[in-house]
Image (spheres, rainbow, N blue to C red):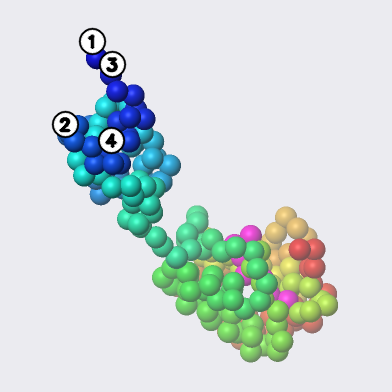
Amino acid sequence: MPKKPTAKKVARRAATGSTAKPVEPAEPVTEASATKAPAQAVRAEMAAAKKGVANKGATTKAPAEKALAKAPTSSAPKLLSGGNPQIGKGDGDAPVAAYLDALPGWKQGIGRRLDALVARTVPGVRRAVRWNTPFYGLAGQGWFLAFHCFDRYVKVTFFKGAALTPPPPVASKVPDVRYVHLTEDEPGDERTLRDWIRQAAALPGEDCF
């Protein structure tokens, strides 16, 4: 009885255009399978070789290359719970701009308005992103404000909010911290927000991160 060809021999014949009688692939690479991770595509090809599959006129192009060529790509940040953008930790204007660009719907309007209000009220403000959250502060004084998206509101954090007059309305488990929630229907009074920002920037901030 003739020996059954090994997987290596089958793969070699496919790569060199052998005249061995071809059969239909048991696991053809379709558009759907090409979108798998490259490692998955390679495993599928190896499984086909073990079953004695030889593709007629197959080329030496690696399955991983096929998967990479067809796999969809996206540079848009992922939106986490509440529509909050996932932005890597970074200092400066660029990471905050990326966060603002990725905000969904009405939350983007609030985020851009708040960012512009801080910039106008506090000349030389320092920006950064920490834990998918924009932070605002001054060099040598620490952070005085941050904000983060939730399902129904944008939570603005004043790290020394308890010392503001009047203090922002939402209390925190941390005694010094106070919040204000900005919603689509109640985006906040600009005059009040500006006054809180001005006061907060004049106080020693948080500089622990």
User: For this rendering, which residue is in front, 204 or 70?
Assistant: 70
Mark-to-mark CA distance, 1 and 3: 6 Å
- Rendered residue at 48%/69% (across/down): 103
Given contact means CB atoms under 8 Å apart, are the residues at marks 1 and 3 in contact? yes
The residue indicated by pointer 3 is: 3
- Rendered residue at 24%/14% (across/down): 2
The residue indicated by pointer 4 is: 13
Vertical placement of 80 versus 8: above or below? below
Horizontal and vertical percent position of residue 71: 35, 54
Horizontal and vertical percent position of residue 58: 25, 44
Which residues fall within the magenta stretch? 131-137
User: For this rendering, which residue is in front, 81 or 196?
Assistant: 81
The residue indicated by pointer 2 is: 21
The secondary structure that dominates the magenta segment is strand
Q: Quadrant of residue 118?
A: bottom right
* Residue 198 visible (yes or no): yes
Vertical placement of 35 versus 190: above or below? above
Q: Residues within 10 Å of mark 4 (few under 14, many from 20)?
A: some
> Which three-letter amino acid code belongs to the residue tagged 1?
Met
Given contact means CB atoms under 8 Å apart, are the residues at marks 3 and 4 in contact? no
Q: Quadrant of the N terminus?
A: top left
> Which three-letter amino acid code belongs to the residue tagged 3?
Lys
> Which three-letter amino acid code belongs to the residue tagged 4?
Arg
Q: Label 3, secondary structure: give it.
A: loop
Q: Label 2, secondary structure: give it.
A: loop
Horizontal and vertical percent position of residue 22: 17, 33
Mark-to-mark CA distance, 4 and 1: 21 Å
The residue indicated by pointer 1 is: 1
